[in-house]
Image (cartoon, rainbow, N blue to C red):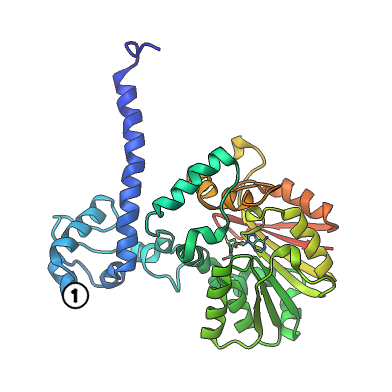
Amino acid sequence: MSTERLDPDEVAEFAFRVWSYKQGEMVSLLIHLGDRLGLYRSLDGAGPMSAQDLAERTGLQPRWLHEWLRGNAAADLLASDDGERFELTAVGAMVLTREEESLQFAAGAFGPPPDPALVDDLADAFRTGTGLPYDRQGPAGVHQTERMLGPWARLTLVPTIVPALEGVHERLSAGALVADVGCGAAVALTTLAEAYPRSTFHGYELSRLAVERARERVAQAGLTNVEIADRRAEELPDGADYSLVLTFDCLHDMTRPDAAAAAIRRAIADDGTWLVKEIRCADEWAGNRRNPMLAMFLGFSIASCLSSALSEPGGAGLGTIGLPPRVLEQLVRDAGFSRFRMHDFEDPANLYYEIRP
Ligand SMILES: C[S@@+](CC[C@H](N)C(=O)[O-])C[C@H]1O[C@@H](n2cnc3c(N)ncnc32)[C@H](O)[C@@H]1O
């Protein structure tokens, strides 16, 4: 194809779009370093600060801090009129540092760049078709997932989500048996176990690294009503009579979500509730295309969700946006569940489903 007839402005505009993703990659590194080194924490509530002020607070080198501060100001993450003094606004603090109190906290999702060997294996997956299990991402994968998904579990499960489910708060208060399947680092489990001390909680997890982290978290919280089992969803004990089963952000990562749903049906009490949290997505491309973060979700899919869901022969390979409401409803009906109700708690990334036998 001849390039003579191409509009150079259009090419330049396209190039700008592509370079803006490189800029995103570099700003991601600045955010990761700011989170890791406690820089946003040091700036929070401190008013305008110079690199020297920040160096005195943190013990870090002012020349490096100056570059980092200017990079953040250029990215509109810090306010600065003169490029010498920089402020983290109250709004910025909610997103960049208030991990314990803010639903909008995002900095925890910005990990270090991926290990090149992991990227080699992902490239190979395009040739072989076989993806990588969660553990291939190493402990950083578990850590990042914990911090990315943690705020919603910690801040909304007990005050908002559980009370919206028919009879669940009452049953948990009286004492019930609960399973969190694909429990990851056990943020949901520990949050519920603290709120409902009369209930007993079982976590099931495929990833060895997540099991280790979940057990550590339970021990740190000093909880005696939680146990973490090194068992995958398909291995749930038949007839366990669970009153509540959770699958949070994990069915679409499973190689066999159909087998997991069937195992949950065998393990749940006839009057039990299965609460599914799944990525907010539409059945059709056009609906998903309206999501301004769709490209990021599809990137997560290749890096993690689709990869995990294709990591074994016969994997369903749903991926990040592969489980919209209609597909999920069919999946759970096929597994023998008859009641299906969607809840929208205004979580920008997820929808919730209350499912019953
Ligand atoms: C995105 S993480 C979500 C973790 C946790 N539910 C949360 O909300 O923080 C998905 C988890 O599903 C787990 N997983 C994938 N396939 C599984 C299976 N067949 N059985 C149990 N866990 C599985 C992964 O190991 C990973 O920890």
Pick the residue in front: 307 or 299: 307
Left or right of 10 in this view: 174: right
Q: Position of residue 201 (x, y in %)?
A: 68, 79
Left or right of 119 in this view: 255: right
Q: Position of residue 137 (x, y in %)?
A: 49, 59
**Can you say whether 177 is above or below 311 in the image?**
below
**Quadrant where the image shows the C terminus:** bottom right
Q: Write down the quadrant of residue 85 in the picture.
A: bottom left
Look at 29% across and 69% down and name the residue there.
37
Left or right of 295 in this view: 268: right
Ligand 1 placement by image quarter: bottom right
- Pointer 1: what residue? 59
Residue 85 seen = no
Q: Position of residue 229 (x, y in %)?
A: 67, 75
Look at 70% across and 87% down and name the residue there.
198
Residue 172 seen = yes
Look at 82% across and 64% down and name the residue there.
265
Pick the residue in front: 296 or 234: 234
Left or right of 300 in this view: 197: right
Amino acid, disc 1: Gly
Look at 18% across and 67% down and name the residue there.
49
